[in-house]
Amino acid sequence: MMTVSFPSSKLSLRYWSLDSWAQFVNEQASSVNWDDPDVSSDSEFAADIAYPEVTITAFTETGRADSSIKAPLQRSYTGTKPVIPSSLADTPCATLGISGLLDLFNATLGTSHTLDTPSLSSVLKDCTKHNYDFGTAYGRLRAVWSADNDGTIQDELRRREADDRKMRQKALVGGRIVQPYLQPRRVWDLCANRVVPWWNSGAFLHCFQLESSMSMIRTESNVRPISHAWMDANGRVDVQTPINGYEWPVPIPKDANLDLIRIELLNLGVEYTWLDVLCLRQKDGMREDLREEEWKLDVPTIGAGVRRKQGGDLPEWVGAAFGT
C-alpha cells in the first residue's frame, strides 16, 4: 500500500488568510499522484496519509502571549494531526462556496472527490443550508469523508444517525434505563475544534463485561474524558463559544480558555474528548426542553463515558484544575 507524504511545514495558522490557507492545502494535494494504482481506495489512503506538520499557539489562537500561559502544554502544539486553525473553523461555509468546501476537504483529508461523487454535492449544500461554519462541517463529515462504503456519504450519515437514535431509544424504557453503558451523545473533535454528535465522529467506545456482575466493566475508547469546571460558582464564568455552536453557555474557571485546553489535549495525543460542560447540554441554553429530555438518559449514563479501564477511571483534569 502506498504512503503519501506531504512536505513538512510549520504553520502559524492565525496569520494565514483564508486564501493562503486554501492555497497551501491545495499545493499539498497537487503533489499527490491520484492516479497511482497503488492507491486502491480512499479509506486505505486516508489511513496511511502523512499530514503536513501544523503549529498552533496560544498567541495565534487567543491573542495571549505564550509566556503568559502558566500551563506549558497550553502554549503551543506542533504535530501532524489534521488540525485546522480556529480562524478557518469559524469561516462560514457560505463564504467558501461548494467548490471551496470541496477543495478544502480534499486537500486536508487527502482525497480526490469531485462534485460528481454520488450525493456529495447535496451533502455540501446542506452545510451551507444549515449555516454551518467550516469547523462544524469538517467535524461532521471528516469521519465519513474517506469511508469505503457500499453506499454514498449521505447513505452512511443516515445509517449512523438512525443507529444512534435506535440505540438511545432502546436504552430508556418506561422511564427506566435498561442499558447504562452508552456512548456519549456528543464529543469534542479537537481537530475541527467543534462539538459534534457521536455518530458524526470517528470516536469509539467498546464495553466488555468481565464478570457476572454488571459493575465489573472494562471499556476501550479513543475518547479522553476530562472535567474542568467542578468548582464554586464564584470561580466560574459562563462563556458562549462557537465550539458548541453557541447552543448553551459553558461554565469554566475564570482563568481558563477552551482554545488553550484544546492545545493541551492535542499535546497529550488526544483527538476526541468529552468535556462535561461542553458536551452535555447545560441550563440557560437555546433548548431547555431538549436539555431536560436529554438529561433523563445522558446524566445517569455518564459513567460509561468516563470509565476507561477495569474498575473505572475518574476524568482527568487539565490546566487550571491543578493550579499549573
Image (spheres, helix red, strand yellow):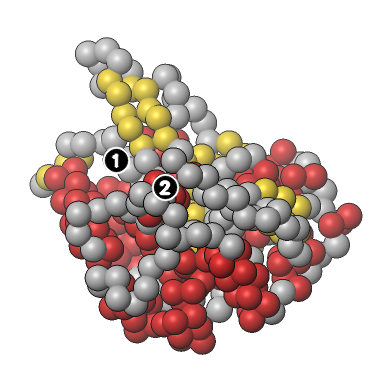
Q: Are marks 2 and 1 in contact (CB under 8 Å)?
A: no
- The residue at 80%/45% (across/down) is 72
Mark yes or no: residue 131 visible: no
Q: CA distance from mark 2 to mark 1?
A: 39 Å
Is residue 40 rendered to the left or right of residue 259?
left
* Front-most of residues 7 and 82: 7
Please give the name of the residue rendered at 42% of the width and 19% of the height, measured from the top-left corner. Answer: 310
Residue holding disc 1: 182
Residue type, mark 2 in image: Asp
Q: Closer to the N terminus: mark 2 or mark 1?
A: 2
Q: Which mark is residue 160?
A: none
- Percent across and percent down for residue 90 are 57, 75
Hey, which residue is sitting farthest top in the picture? Answer: 211
Which residue is labeled 2 in the image? 38
Q: How far from the left and from the top, in percent, is residue 269?
A: 60, 40
At label 1, which amino acid type do we have?
Leu
- Compared to residue 317, the image places residue 53 above or below, namely below
Locate residue 159 relative to residue 97 in the image: left or right.
left
User: Can the viewer see residue 177 in this picture?
Assistant: yes
User: Could you tell me which secondary element the residue under label 1 belongs to?
Assistant: loop
